[in-house]
Image (cartoon, rainbow, N blue to C red):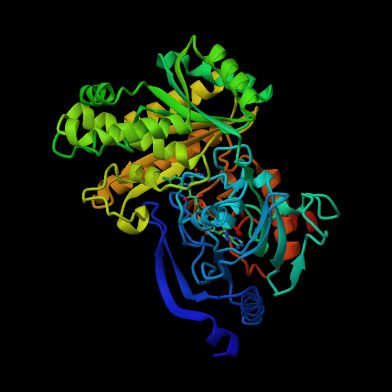
Amino acid sequence: MSSVAKEAEISTSTTLFSGLGFHARVVSQVVQPKSAQELQQYIAQAYQNKQPVYPIGKGNNWGYGCKTPPSDGCTLLDLSAMNQILSFDETLGVIEIEPGVTQGQVARYLENTPWILDCTGAGPDTSIMGNVLERGFGHGPVGNRSQHFTISELILADGEVIRLNQSSRYCGRAGLSANLHELFTQNNIAVISKMTFELMRKPECSLRCLVRLKSPEHLPDYIDIMRRLKSEGTIDGLPHLGNTYRMLTMMERFNFERWDPAKGANEADIAQLCQQYQLTPWSGAFVITGATSIAKAKAAQVKKLLTPIAQVNIVSLKTLKQLNQIAQKFSPVFGRIALYRRFQNSLNDFTEMMDMLEGNPKDMALKGCYWRYRKDIPAKMNPVEDGCGFFWVAPALPLIGDDVEQCIQLSQKAFDAAGFEFGVTLTAVNAHLCQAIISIYYDTTDKNEVERATRLAQELRALYREQRWPCYRRSVDEMPFDSEQEFELDALKLRQRIKAAFDPEDMVSPGRYQPNPSLDFSKEHQG
Ligand SMILES: Cc1cc2nc3c(=O)[nH]c(=O)nc-3n(C[C@H](O)[C@H](O)[C@H](O)COP(=O)(O)OP(=O)(O)OC[C@H]3O[C@@H](n4cnc5c(N)ncnc54)[C@H](O)[C@@H]3O)c2cc1C
């Protein structure tokens, strides 16, 4: 064993389950470097030994594959111990981080500064770098994360260190590297060791807008209104809208005593639960921020456009927290009344969720993953390690009401036929893109159900390909891609050529976001 290998913590061959049906891969060893220098030395040595590597930050890529590489035999480079916040420019609101830095860590670091983190819903223990590299998104003005970072340092497959940003101070993607940064997202051409990431200024006024559509028929209108509100700049965050099941799964559990898992939840019972929680078929929330007068003017415009189709409540976080405190104060008196308890719990959950939009990551959304889980939910949740079954499928749609409605109808049909509850969130990422995140929750203790859920995931992926709705993010059980079925073939060909130029020996994350090697496009180009 070399000195580098001795220094980095090493464990040997392990089977890693991705949490996606029965999918698993074997990693030959797990290495945990503690510094960029140790990481560089390890990569250079692995290259000499022709040993492929697979880097992860925290490995909490739940619903898309966690720590599992697309192919067997990699060394897992677990970068979670490289968790230094390297610098913070308090004037410009940017932070430079290592791969293992988490949302929770940054939120704590920024306390008492004018800046906050634009959080994702994945909770405090997830990495920022892994999420950015997967092109993940949060909720606020810099929530479309892949547009708000630069790579300061990366390590190529042979161990060469490249520094992309050499300016005296952060100035975005100016300079010769221009948009090279995004080339390294959803890719397998380098290991990223340092990244600079833009923060969100703590707003003077931060309003919370709660929207409940009056009827499911209003979904296309809502989407078209969002296009207008996003394109005219009234909403600068990323409004999320969830359907009944997406909301209900965070509050309730599948009733195994009353419902048949092969057929799905009973509609009449669900209608009753919706009444209890006052859930409409679609409900959502977003932030309206800015100087007080500007935020108020934006709120008035939101209310004017949405009121014909939705109940719209706009409240400041401060008021919400005060209401929650009052409700808690009266809990010893009224807490015995079931209706009051439900009201108080809902108000508390909503306040917590809205606090997340203030830069404080929460793990409460993880509860939803336990919908078809048969045991008690542990206090500290890690849904895949705990044994929850779920897939995310993420078709990207044009922000046009009829297109989104079509996707919802077709997806609902597939879920009904498969006997699963159809849960979805719709996010207006910008004025053009509606990102659907579709969840399939299943019981991992039932082999038939795992197979049914896997089949449904495959059917949905095929459906979206057929409709030419590209998924914004892909799961490890699909990789390497079966090129015959992909519709963006030219893009895949180019990706393969880029990969060959950067990493001809296929040493970094083989198969990740790449076509199956049996279809070698590069030969066509040589010929
Ligand atoms: C209930 C729930 C809610 C969620 N909400 C959101 C949400 O709001 N937004 C969202 O985007 N996601 C969400 N997710 C999905 C996912 O959990 C998050 O995206 C999470 O941040 C990904 O895990 P991670 O940050 O630990 O990344 P990692 O698992 O560390 O990284 C992800 C991948 O990036 C690559 N990678 C990581 N580090 C490097 C590196 N240094 N160099 C090269 N490649 C690297 C690897 O291939 C790795 O597999 C949610 C999941 C659940 C269960």
Q: Residue furthest top?
A: 308
Q: Which quarter of the figure has residue 33? A: bottom right
Along the line of sight, which residue is nearer the eye, 469 or 427? Answer: 427
Q: Residue furthest right?
A: 176
| Coordinates of residue 196 in the picture (x, y in percent) | 68, 56
Along the line of sight, which residue is nearer the eye, 178 or 204? Answer: 204
Q: Which quarter of the figure has residue 95? A: bottom right
76 in relation to 17, above or below: below
- In the picture, which quadrant includes the N terminus? bottom right
Along the line of sight, which residue is nearer the eye, 451 or 163? Answer: 163
Please name the residue shown 61% across and 53% down the image. Answer: 133
| Coordinates of residue 489 in the picture (x, y in percent) | 66, 44
Please name the residue shown 27% across and 43% down the image. Answer: 372
371 in relation to 280, above or below: below
Please name the residue shown 30% across and 46% down the image. Answer: 370
- In the picture, which quadrant includes the C terminus? bottom right
Please name the residue shown 69% across and 69% down the image. Answer: 155
Along the line of sight, which residue is nearer the eye, 468 or 356? Answer: 356
| Coordinates of residue 303 in the picture (x, y in percent) | 53, 15
Question: In the picture provided, is 428 more to the left or to the right than 352?
Answer: right
348 in relation to 53, above or below: above
User: Is residue 422 something that shows in the picture?
Assistant: no
User: Is residue 434 something that shows in the picture?
Assistant: yes
**How many callouts does the rendering have?**
0
305 in relation to 159, above or below: above
Question: In the picture provided, is 93 more to the left or to the right than 101?
Answer: right
| Coordinates of residue 328 in the picture (x, y in percent) | 28, 36
